[in-house]
């Protein structure tokens, strides 16, 4: 029997969407206000889920406290109240779109989640705009 266990978290961060190969006009055409040279921020909501078999000894798929602590250290501490473009090494050369942020989060968490567990990241940039990444 496979069960999905989820933890919700959040972080606040600034970013600017920008392709350095393009001039400012093209960046503005593609990214609109999100390409502002002064950056802009979001209150990101994050749902991290692990899916797997229930351990017969513990009754857990994964101890939710361990998942909470992992998210706190790897994501919240690293991203919260940061400028993603300037303060987070993964985005120095990577455009911090919601898609890229979700993939970076997944990669940061994957190394600490047992390989037999499936990992899913759902990142809300706004209440209506969100992306999902499962490593596929």
Image (tube, rainbow, N blue to C red):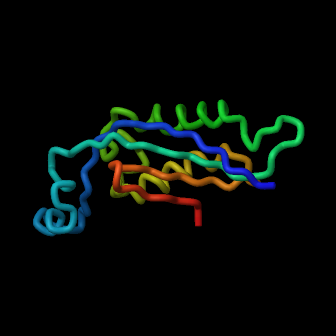
- What residue is at 53 percent from the left and 52 percent from the top? 121
Image quadrant holding the N terminus, namely: bottom right
In the rendered image of this protein, does residue 60 appear above or below residue 34? above
In the shown orientation, is residue 108 left or right of residue 60? Answer: left
- What residue is at 55 percent from the left and 37 percent from the top? 71
In the rendered image of this protein, does residue 16 appear above or below residue 7? below
- What residue is at 58 percent from the left and 54 percent from the top? 120
Indicate the position of residue 40 as horizontal and vertical percent values: 22, 44
Question: Which residue is nearer to you in this view: 37 or 62?
Answer: 62
In the rendered image of this protein, does residue 19 appear above or below residue 112? below
**Numbered disc total:** 0
Question: Which residue is nearer to you in this view: 76 or 49?
Answer: 49
In the shown orientation, is residue 123 left or right of residue 36? Answer: right
In the shown orientation, is residue 25 left or right of residue 127? Answer: left
Image quadrant holding the C terminus, namely: bottom right
Indicate the position of residue 30 as horizontal and vertical percent values: 20, 67
For this orientation, the residue located farthest to the left is 25
For this orientation, the residue located farthest to the right is 57
Indicate the position of residue 47 as horizontal and vertical percent values: 52, 46
Question: Which residue is nearer to you in this view: 111 or 33?
Answer: 33
Indicate the position of residue 50 as horizontal and vertical percent values: 66, 49
- What residue is at 89 percent from the left and 37 percent from the top? 57
Q: Quadrant of residue 89?
A: top left
In the rendered image of this protein, does residue 115 appear above or below residue 14? below
In the shown orientation, is residue 85 left or right of residue 56? Answer: left
């Amino acid at each position: 029997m496979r069960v999905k266990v989820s933890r919700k978290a959040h972080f606040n961060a600034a970013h600017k969407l920008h392709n350095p190969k393009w001039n400012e006009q093209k960046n503005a055409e593609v990214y609109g206000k999100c390409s502002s040279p002064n950056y802009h921020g979001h209150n990101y909501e994050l749902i991290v889920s692990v899916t797997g078999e229930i351990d017969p000894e513990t009754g857990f798929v994964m101890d939710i406290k361990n998942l909470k602590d992992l998210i706190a250290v790897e994501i919240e501490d690293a991203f919260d109240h940061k400028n993603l473009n300037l303060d987070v090494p993964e985005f120095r050369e990577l455009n911090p779109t919601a898609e890229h942020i979700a993939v970076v989060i997944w990669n940061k968490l994957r190394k600490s989640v047992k390989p037999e567990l499936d990992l899913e990241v759902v990142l809300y940039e706004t209440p209506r705009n969100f992306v999902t990444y499962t490593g596929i």
